[in-house]
Amino acid sequence: MSALDAGFYFIEDENVPMHVGSVLVFEGPVPSYGDVIRLLVSKLPDVPRYRQRVKSLPMHLGRPVWVDDEHFQILYHVRHTAVPAPGGDDQLRNLAGRLFAQRLDLTKPLWEIWLVEGLEGGRWALISKVHHCMIDGIAGTDMMQLVLDWRKDSELSEPRPWTPEPNPSTLDLVADGVRDAVLTPLGHLAAVPALARRLRSGSELLGIGRALAGSLPGTARRLTTRAAGSLNGSLGPHRRWVWAKADLTETKQIRKVTGGTVNDVILAAVTRGFRDLLESRGELSEGMVVRTMVPVSVRSRDQRNKLDNRVSAVLLNLPVSEPDPQARLAAVREQMDDLKSSRQAAGADAITGMANFAAPTLLALGSRTAMRFPQQFLQTVTTNVPGPRVPLYMLGRRLAEIYPYVPIASTMRISVGIFSYLGQITFGINADFDGVPDIQVLADGVRAGFDELLALT
C-alpha cells in the first residue's frame, strides 16, 4: 500500500468503518442471484484486487501488503436480500444505512455487494461497499465502469481459471518492509534534482511563491473564521444515510447566468442545506461558517483504472450565515477561484506525499492518533465525483440512478458525497445516527438551495 492507502486502513475502528460505497438502482426485471454471481466471476480478472486480502506486518515494520486470498469465495462477498414490497425510497435508504454501518471483514477481500429486491415499480438495486484503502472516488468510478457494461446486449465472457499466488512468509514481508522503508524515501529524494532543474531559472518558483503569498490573506481568513461547533462530536456505531437530487441541466442554467462553475453551484446548494440545519437547531449566528474539506483528484490520465488513492484536498468555508443565495454563491466562487489560483491542492498533495518518508510504525500510530484527537477545525467532507453521461447496463438492465456513500471519521459527524450520471446530480448524505437525528433537514435544504437559485435565474 501507499502511505495514503495505509492511512485509510489504519484509522478504521469499531465506530469508524472506512469503506466507501454506493447504491445503484436499476430498471427491472430483477436478475437471479446466480446470474449476478456469474457476471461478477467473469469480471474478476479485470479487478484482481477483489481476490486479495490485506496482510499486516508485525509491529508495522512495513506498510500493509496485498496478498491473494487462498480461500476466496465469491458467495461470501455477494449477498442477497429484499425490502418488503413495494419498497420505496425510505425502505431502501434505511437498509443501506444499516449495511453501510457494518464493518467489512478485514481478514477477507475488502468488498461486498448486496442484491436488493422488492423495490416499487419493478426496480431493484445493488448496494456496494469497498474499503477506502483500495479506492478513491475516481478509482471507484473507473471500477464501476469495469463491472457494468456500455451496451445493453453485451455477452458474458467465460470464467477464466484462477490460481492464487502463494502468500509470502512473514519473514520475507518484514525484510521487504524494512527495505521499502529505506528505498521509498530515497526514491522520492531522487526526484529532487529534477525539481531543482525545473526551478533553476527561478521563474516557476517565483510564480508559485507569488500565488501562495497572494492567497495567504484569504487562507488566514478561512482558518480563523468562527465555525459551527455542534456538527462535531463523538461517533457511534450506527449511521443515518439520506439522499437528495438535482438536475444537471438546471445547474448549468444557474451557472450560465451567475458565472463560476457547476461545482460552485453545487457547493452553494450544500451551504443552504447546512444553513437550514443550523437554523432549525437555533444555532445559526452572524459570521458563522461550516468548514469543509473538498477532496481534489491528482490522478493523471495514465493512472486511470488503477485501484488506489490519488487524492489531495482543499479547505472551504461554507458561508451558512449569509441569507442571500446569490451572495452565498459569490462567496463560494471567490474562495474556489482563490484556491485554484494559489495551487493549494498541489501543495496539499506534496504534504501528503511526505507521509512516504514516515516509518510504517509511526504512520500507523500517527493515523490513528490524528483521527481520535478531538478537533473543531473541520465540520464535514464534501466530495464531488463526475460520472459517465451515457447509460450503463448490468445483465441488460439499465442503471437508472446511483447514490454515493462517503465515510465519516474523527469528530466529523456528517459527510456529503456527490455524483453525476445521465444528467442527474445525486447527493448521498451520511451522518452519525445518534448525533444527527435531523439529517433530513440538511437533505431537504440542499434541494431548496437549487430551487432558490433556479428561481433567481
Image: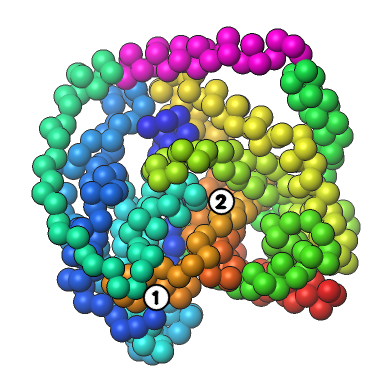
**In the rendered structure, does residue 135 fall within the stretch colored magenta?**
no
The residue under label 2 is which amino acid type?
Ser
- Kindly identify the residue that appears in the image at 11 percent across and 49 percent down: 161
Point out residue 317 in the picture as x, y percentages from the top left corner: 76, 49
Q: Is residue 14 visible from the viewing direction of this image?
A: no
Q: Nearer the viewer, residue 318 or 156?
A: 156
Foreground mark, 1 or 2? 1
Quickly name the residue at label 2. 234
Q: Secondary structure at mark 1?
A: strand
Quote the CA–CA distance across marks 1 and 2.
40 Å
Quadrant hosting residue 38: bottom left
- Kindly identify the residue that appears in the image at 45 percent across and 44 percent down: 304
Q: Which residues are magenta?
A: 177-202
In which quadrant is the C terminus drawn? bottom right
100 relative position to 292: left or right: left
When the figure is inspected, residue 310 is found, relative to residue 124, above or below; the finding is: above
308 relative position to 322: left or right: left
Q: Along the polypeptide, which appears first: circle 1 or circle 2?
A: 2
208 relative position to 432: left or right: right
Q: Secondary structure at mark 2?
A: loop
- Kindly identify the residue that appears in the image at 45 percent across and 84 percent down: 88
Q: Which is the main secondary structure of the residues drawn in magenta?
A: helix
Q: Nearer the viewer, residue 414 or 246?
A: 246
Point out residue 214 in the picture as x, y percentages from the top left corner: 85, 31
Point out residue 400 in the picture as x, y percentages from the top left corner: 45, 75
**In the rendered structure, does residue 191 fall within the stretch colored magenta?**
yes
